[in-house]
Image: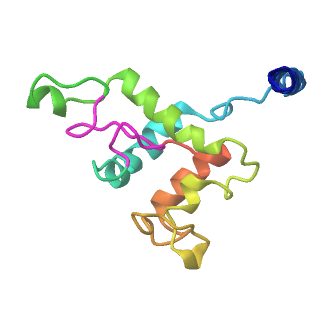
């Protein structure tokens, strides 16, 4: 009986090993352009980042390190822990500006249509095509100048004032 049990165990191991090798087939995933490709960081800094800092960077929202959209801002979240209050409220560093750009541009990933984007949709009221957002609608609608600035940046048509 122990021989039979040993044979079954060996057969089980062989099946498991075979399944592992079968699962290791090569997958050909075509390269995808990074989501920030084609987005203008200068336009982000002059017309989008100020909106995100003003509207979204609170510590209960996107001013926390673990948030999918994470926004650094003076007096709130900083890339490095400030030594004192004066250090917390100084202007953002170049690295913090760039990190904000990368964080926001990540929401462009996979969206062919600028309007099919969480960064623009979650900020709108449902009556204007907005998606559920824990913080509620941020902008009054698609005519809001702040929303237009974000949508134009994602579409590649944004300009600095």
Residue 161 in view in this figure: no
Residue at 63%, 54% (x, y): give it: 117
Of all residues, the one furthest to the bottom in this rendering is 127
Q: Nearer the viewer, residue 60 or 35?
A: 60
Highlighted range, magenta: 62-78
Give the colouring mode of the picture: rainbow
Q: Nearer the viewer, residue 133 or 130?
A: 133
Residue at 42%, 68% (x, y): give it: 136
Q: Nearer the viewer, residue 157 or 48?
A: 48
24 horizontally vs 99: left or right:
right
Residue at 87%, 25% (x, y): give it: 4
Residue 75 within the magenta-colored segment of the rendering: yes
21 horizontally vs 83: left or right:
right
19 horizontally vs 72: left or right:
right
Q: Nearer the viewer, residue 21 or 36?
A: 21
Residue 73 within the magenta-colored segment of the rendering: yes
Residue at 38%, 40% (x, y): give it: 71
How far across and how far down the image is residue 70, in percent? 41, 40
How far across and how far down the image is residue 153, in percent? 58, 45
Q: Quadrant of residue 92?
A: top left
Majority SS type along the magenta span: loop
72 horizontally vs 140: left or right:
left
Numbered circles on residues, count:
0
Residue 41 in view in this figure: yes
How far across and how far down the image is residue 33, in percent? 74, 29
Q: Quadrant of residue 26?
A: top right
Answer above or below: position of 104 versus 19: below
Q: Quadrant of the N terminus?
A: top right
């Amino acid at each position: 009986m122990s021989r039979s049990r040993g044979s079954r165990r060996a057969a089980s191991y062989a099946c498991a090993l075979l399944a592992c090798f079968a699962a290791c087939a090569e997958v050909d995933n075509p390269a995808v352009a990074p989501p920030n490709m084609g987005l203008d960081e200068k336009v982000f800094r002059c017309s989008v980042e100020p909106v995100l800092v003003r509207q979204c960077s609170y510590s209960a929202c996107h001013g926390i390190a673990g948030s999918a959209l994470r926004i650094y801002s003076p007096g709130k979240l900083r890339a490095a822990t400030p030594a004192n209050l004066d250090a917390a409220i100084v202007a953002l560093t170049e690295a913090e500006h760039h990190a904000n750009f990368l964080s926001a541009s990540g929401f462009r990933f996979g969206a062919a249509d600028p309007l099919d984007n969480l960064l623009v949709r979650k900020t709108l009221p449902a009556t204007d095509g907005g998606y559920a957002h824990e913080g509620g609608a941020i902008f009054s609608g698609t005519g809001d100048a702040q929303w237009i600035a974000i949508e134009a940046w994602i579409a590649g048509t944004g300009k600095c004032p």
